[in-house]
Image: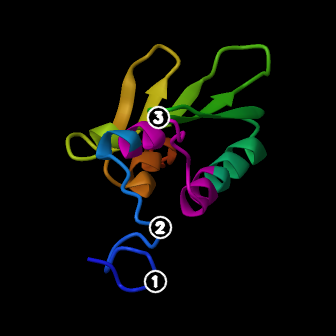
C-alpha cells in the first residue's frame, strides 16, 4: 500500500527493501572499536603506569571481530599486556579481557573497570 508520495506506507520512503543477509554482511565490514568511555578508562590507567615508569608505548588495533589495546615497555618489544574487547563473548565470559605476554588470560569480565583492576597495586603488610 502506498501513502500517495510514491513510498511504502510505514516503511522505507524509497520503497527499496534490503535483504537481511546484506545488512549482516555490511555490519561484518565495520571494525569493532573502543568507545570514548572505554578509551578514557584505559588511557587513565595507561597514564598512571607511564608515570610509574612501567609502560612506555601503546598500540590500538580495530579488527573485524575484536579491538585490542596493546601495552609495551619498549617500542621494539612484544606487548606486555593486551586489553581486548570481543563482543562475541559478551553473553558468556564477558566482552573484556586482559591477556599477558605469555597468552595467559589474567582477568575477564563484563565490565571494563572491573577487568582493569588486575593492574591495581595492593599494599602488603610487612612484619619484622
Work out whether residue 122 or residue 5 is closer to the camera in this orientation and state it.
5
Residue 23 on image: x %, y %: 39, 46
> For the point 72% across and 50% down, which residue is it?
47
Gap in Å between the C-alphas at discs 3 and 1?
A: 43 Å
Residue that numbered label 2 is attached to:
14
Please tell me whether residue 90 belongs to the stretch shown in magenta: no
Q: Is residue 55 visible?
A: no
Q: Nearer the viewer, mark 1 or mark 2?
A: 1
Q: What is the secondary structure assignment of the residue under circle 1? A: loop
Q: Nearer the viewer, mark 2 or mark 3?
A: 2
Q: What is the secondary structure assignment of the residue under circle 3? A: loop
| Lateral position of residue 42 relative to residue 128, left or right | right
Residue that numbered label 3 is attached to:
66
> For the point 61% across and 54% down, which residue is it?
39
Residue 33 on image: x %, y %: 55, 46
Work out whether residue 62 or residue 126 is closer to the camera in this orientation and state it.
62
> For the point 55% across and 31% down, which residue is it?
63
Q: Image height check: is 2 above or below 98?
A: below
For residue 36, what is the image quadrant?
bottom right
Circles 1, 2 touching at the beta carbon (< 8 Å): no
Q: Earlier in the sequence, mark 3 or mark 1?
A: 1
Q: Earlier in the sequence, mark 1 or mark 2?
A: 1
Residue that numbered label 1 is attached to:
5
Q: What is the secondary structure assignment of the residue under circle 2? A: loop
Q: Image height check: is 14 above or below 16?
A: below
Gap in Å between the C-alphas at discs 1 and 2?
A: 10 Å
Q: Image height check: is 98 above or below 12?
A: above
Per the rendered image, the range of residues in magenta is 23-42
Amino acid at each position: 500500500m502506498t501513502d500517495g508520495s510514491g513510498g511504502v506506507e510505514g516503511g522505507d520512503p524509497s520503497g527499496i527493501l534490503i535483504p537481511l543477509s546484506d545488512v549482516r554482511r555490511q555490519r561484518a565490514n565495520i571494525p569493532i572499536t573502543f568507545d570514548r568511555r572505554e578509551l578514557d578508562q584505559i588511557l587513565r590507567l595507561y597514564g598512571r603506569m607511564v608515570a610509574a615508569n612501567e609502560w612506555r608505548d601503546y598500540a590500538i588495533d580495530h579488527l573485524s571481530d575484536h579491538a585490542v589495546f596493546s601495552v609495551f615497555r619498549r617500542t621494539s618489544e612484544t606487548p606486555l599486556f593486551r586489553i581486548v574487547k570481543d563482543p562475541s563473548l559478551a553473553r558468556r565470559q564477558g566482552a573484556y579481557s586482559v591477556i599477558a605476554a605469555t597468552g595467559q588470560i589474567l582477568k575477564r569480565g563484563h565490565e571494563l573497570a572491573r577487568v582493569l583492576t588486575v593492574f591495581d597495586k595492593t599494599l602488603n603488610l610487612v612484619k619484622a
